[in-house]
Image: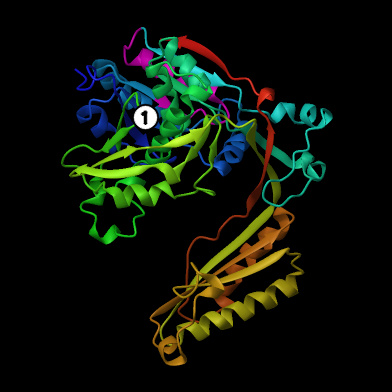
Amino acid sequence: MKPYSDTGAVRLGAGGGFWGDALDPAVEVLEKGQVDYLCFDFLAELTMALLQRQRQKNPALGYIPDAVAAMKALMPGARERGTRLVSNGGGVNPKSGAQRIVEEARVLGLKGTRVALVEGDDLLARLDELMAAGIPLVNMETGDSDFARVRDRVVAANVYTDASGIVESLSAGADVVLTGRVSDNALYVGPIMHHFGWRHDAAHADRIAAAITLGHIAECASACTGGMSSRFAEMPHMGRVGFPIVDFHADGTADLSKVAGSGGRLDAHTVKEHLVYEIADPRRYIMPDGIADFTTLALTETGPDRVRVSGVRGLPQPDTLKLVIGYQDGWIGESMAFFPWPHAYQRALKAQQTMLERFERMGLAADQIHFDFVGLNVLHGPAAPLPDDERLAECNEIGLRCAVRTRSAEEAEKVRRAGSHLWIMGPGGTSFGTPMKPRPVVSLWPTLIPRDLVRQTIEIMEA
């Protein structure tokens, strides 16, 4: 029995914040959180290009395997509790992912389970059509308008779509919804709009903006319950952290909480930390479903691990949608070695010189050569001040990472070979891991296209 059915509120739980996130907190939310919806965000911008490469090798792949595994684990309990599961784990091949989920539902004996497939975000096959129509496809980050120069290297093109397909799927009675590249917060906006019967119009702009805001806060799961927090040292039992739960009300206010007794902490500070995560202008957080103004809201701690969000204002949907295009952009060759005390830093410097000499001898054609001294400047690069000579001499161990960007796999392979040459040409006492294989670079070309060029479709599959 849902505890908020008599109030008209809808209760949503976060099931995951990225591909590879823990499943046990989602199970905890399902079993103890009494949620109407459990929402899973599996995608990042680069993920789409990586999945597209998988699909090119095997047409049956391209979805997030974790999405299928999560649905398999949770569908029995979700049916028992009346909880509906919403995920963007379809990646670039939501149809195959949805078919796999239906197969798992059949094996589990969950006859009648309705799995909704939402498509329409994949525009890879339509790029030439867009170019022929005169859509400029200007790179949002660099201003580069010469998209034609990378066209023949494109491996993925996915547009961030709104919650319309999710709303339609839920209205059609879906128990599980699997999408491609909807916006992260659309996973929450869709169930909220469906529950209250809202439409994308000016009359609902503020309340949809509130749904976008709550979706943004909850979409990365434990990131608002202590994960990545500046107060991480204070957070209790993060190894069994609780994922957030959202009670969203018809007036656009919402209460954030987590399962009692779960790890981590949810307070105004942890919510603020994620509220400003990965945003640009806080007054105009532009999403496919609308534009939210984060400067209008109020956060109120109403109890232990409970925060009320109110006062969100916003604007209707923008006229354009973000299209992220991934294209092949060379290769990376990489090596790693570790050097012991005494004189660890001097050994690493000598190894760096040796590798540069090997590159010259091997005729390496490189666009960029980069070295990191592990333990000294990997995270902050040149902004990290080196210790003085006395402290450097006391270093117990130092690692040397070399990363080289090349135009071909053959050139990148030279980096691996030069790294292995240090096994004997390098300083005594050096420790090595397994040589790293060259890997392709996928760069992103984000651009804007008119909204009316994109149409979502849904298909209901039944077990």
Residue in the image at 41% along x and 31% along y: 211
Residue for point 74% across, 70% down: 362
| Foreground of the two, 30 or 269 | 269
Q: Is residue 133 above or below residue 293?
A: above
Q: Is residue 451 left or right of residue 266?
A: right
- Which residue is identified by label 1? 252
288 relative to 240 in the view: left or right:
right
Residue 256's spot in the image, x, y percent? 28, 37
The quarter of the image holding the N terminus is top left
Q: Residues within 10 Å of mark 1 (few under 14, many from 20)?
A: many
- Residue nearest the observer in this picture, 132 or 164: 164
Magenta stretch: give its range.
86-111
Q: Is 367 placed above or below 24 here?
A: below
Looking at the picture, tell me which residue is in the foreground, 218 or 108.
218
Question: Can the viewer see residue 99?
Answer: no
Q: Is residue 79 left or right of residue 156?
A: left
Q: At label 1, which amino acid type do we have?
A: Gly
- Residue sitting at 44 percent across and 20 percent down? 177
Name the spot of residue 337 as percent of width and height, x first: 50, 70
Q: How many marks?
A: 1
Residue 218 seen = yes
Q: Is residue 93 above or below residue 322?
A: above
> Is residue 320 toward the left or the right of residue 316 in the image?
right
Q: Quadrant of residue 194?
A: top left
Residue 117 in the image: x percent, y percent?
51, 18
Dividing the image into 4 quarters, which one contains the C terminus?
A: top left
Is 108 part of what is drawn in magenta? yes
